[in-house]
Amino acid sequence: MSRLYLTLRVTVKDGERAILTRNGRYERVLGPGRHWVFDPLCTLKVEIFQVVRAEFAADRYAVMKAERPDLAAELFEAVETRADELAIVSLDGRPVHLAGPWQVRVFWKVATAVEVERIDVARDPRVAARHLTLLDRARSVYLAETVVENHEAGLLYVEGRLVERLAPGRHAYWTVNRKVEVKRVDLRPQAVEITAQEMLTKDRIALRVTLSALRRIVDPERAASAVADVDGWLYRLVQFAIREAVAARTLDEVLSAKGALEQELRTFVRERLSETGIEVTELGVKDVILPGEIRELVNKVVEAERTAKANLIRRQEETAATRSLLNTAKLMEDNPILLRLKELESLEKLVEKVGRIDLHAGEAQGLDALLNKLLRLKAPEPA
């Protein structure tokens, strides 16, 4: 742009437009090319704008529309939204802008095709799948999006009110003039460890009990409305149950009746979970931790019990052996043949100990002669 004598020279490139104002009032628009404008009093002012996929100031558009409505309608496409309305603005077929409620946005349309799709978000807060493909979801502040996994249940809250349970998949909702929240609830069994805390038994002995529980949510809607923190609430409930159960038992009962203790705990917990939509599948005692001096005493008692049991078993075996010998003696007393057979059995064992003996025909005169010879061999030689 330059001046020469009484004229103003303006050069407008492709993709640009020049707006001429005289004394602050819109006069006309210059297209691409070189223009000579007569301006003897230097009252003209030139503004050059990029018009390819470009936006124009809404306040200036309002002034131009009031003064030159014909010029505003020829150059611009204005997008105005209501309270419960959104608008997707596409430039040359490509979605570029999302206009929120009560917004006015103006776009040059002399070199760009401007398309506007309006969305009434008051009817249905759910975002259509087609609109999801058009929007930049990472930057949009007008929608909430979540993905519900196969092992989860989604709970949709609108303005703090539970509306419905969502199936697994992708879900998106408009957040215009409303608060939309999706809570995801894991339906898989979860392990809850109840750490040891010191408690007293009925006989005033301090101990610590560690428990483990497996819980799962069977009714997400009821669980969400009944309990804020499932694991924390279950942790405290089991703590109360174990304290009450231990306080009613002695140390021996706690150590010996572990199964009964676990059954009482499961019954206690399940009765209080029946209306919450939470199910405890397993609940058991992992460890019973005793103080050092009590542990030593228990170990001594166990050792004494095992020693007494071993002595009892040894005495029972000795008694059984003695009874067997007595029965054998009675049989031999009544049956001489059996006694003779027993002597032969003893003789065979003695032969095995002494070694193999060669008998001559003249030396062996029956079984008595053989026995006498063995006895002589076994007797010690004289000094």
Image (tube, grey):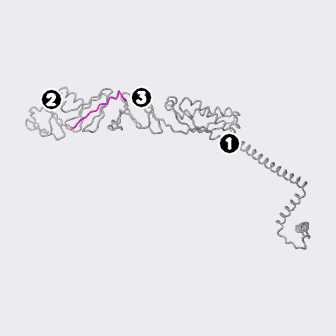
> Could you tell me the amino acid type at mark 2?
Asn
Image x and y of residue 125, in percent: 37, 30
Magenta span contains residue 116? yes
Q: Which segment did they paint magenta?
A: 112-124
Quote the CA–CA distance across marks 3 and 2. 54 Å
Marks 1/2: CA–CA distance: 99 Å
Helix, strand or loop at mark 3:
strand
Q: Which residue is mark 2?
A: 23
Quadrant where the N terminus sits is top left
Name the one closer to the observer, 59 or 317: 317
Of marks 3 and 2, which one's residue comes earlier in the chain? 2
Q: Which one is in front in this view, the residue at disc 1 or the one at disc 2? A: 1
Image coords of residue 98 (percent x, y): 30, 34
The front one of 346 and 189 is 346
Badge nearest the viewer, 3 or 2: 3
Report the disc number at residue 158: 3
Q: Which mark is residue 292?
A: 1
Tell me what residue is drawn at x 86 percent, y 60 percent.
341
The kind of residue on which mark 1 rests is: Gly
* 153 left or right of 12 in image: right
